[in-house]
Image: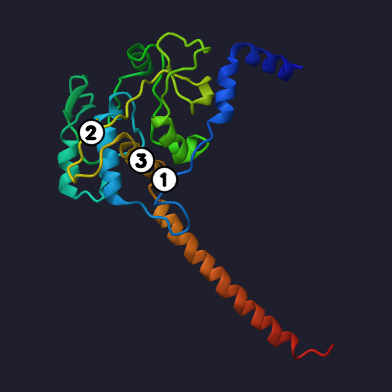
Amino acid sequence: MRKIVLAAALAAVLPVSGLNAAEEAVLPKQDWTFNGVFGKFDKEQLQRGFQVYKEVCSNCHSLKYIAFRNLEALGYSDEQVKSLAAQYQIEDGPDDSGDMFKRKGKASDYMPKPFPNEQAARASNGGALPPDLSLIVKAREGGPDYVYNLLLGYEDAPADMKMAPGMNYNKYFTRGAFQLAMAQQVKDGVVTFADGSPNDAAHIAKDVTAFLAWTAEPKLEARHSTGFRVMLYTLLFTVLAYFLKRRIWSRIGH
């Protein structure tokens, strides 16, 4: 009975046009270099994605599980990582007087949050809480395909849909009945890549999504390598066990 009541309540709240849009908005699949047993990350793409996060996403979203030293896996040298960390002011302490203080970041520090607490984050975003992006690709159904399409899924709301104040229509954000507090952030030319890579919205979205896939699973390549070796060992062991079985049973009359 509770499920029936809940379903009826949702049907009353969600606009019919939104439900139709949900059926039509099929999540397009993308080709990712890290897919498959032999999938690997493109380090140049990850560096571009980190640039997008740093210049666009980090204003609201944190990466609480990523330390500066982890960025060496993207192809940065130890000196580059130290230089990058030093650009940030990290709160530390208390000192001998019991006070907190600011210092330059170190490679061992985790990337600082854009807001000191949840209340400050909500106050700066109209009451919405920007999620931490460390595991966002693993936390959403559809994984990188969902994140990529969400970044590009902003459109004008259907004429018969009533939008809440400050909300933006996104055809892939079904969790919030297609209404998303975050405005479109990924646009053509929003960043300029030093290597001259295309910086249209589609390429920018793909680069930052690949970076977020890495933050969600930085050991993916090692896992793929280990899995392949385990499968190879299992196959070899199976073949050896088969021939051993034939040798043993060949001596026994039937």
The residue that appears at 71% across and 14% down in the rendered structure is: 5
Determine the residue positioned at 74% across, 89% down: 250
What is the quadrant of residue 197 in the picture? top left
**Viewer-proximal residue, 227 or 82?**
227
Q: How many marks?
A: 3
Residue that carries the numbered disc 2 in the rendered image: 191
Residue extending farthest front: 159
Q: Residues within 10 Å of mark 3 (few under 14, many from 20)?
A: many
Q: Secondary structure at mark 2?
A: loop
Q: Is residue 196 left or right of residue 26?
A: left
Mark 1 or 3, closer to the camera: 3
User: In terms of sequence position, does the residue under pointer 1 or pointer 3 come before the other?
Assistant: 3
On the question of residue 126 being in view, the answer is yes
For residue 223, above or below residue 15: below
In the image, residue 39 sits, relative to residue 213, either above or below, namely below
- For residue 76, side relative to residue 61 (left or right): left
Mark 1 sits on what residue? 217
Residue 216, image x, y percentages: 41, 41
Give the residue type that dot 3 points to.
Lys
Query: Residue beneath label 3, please?
Result: 206
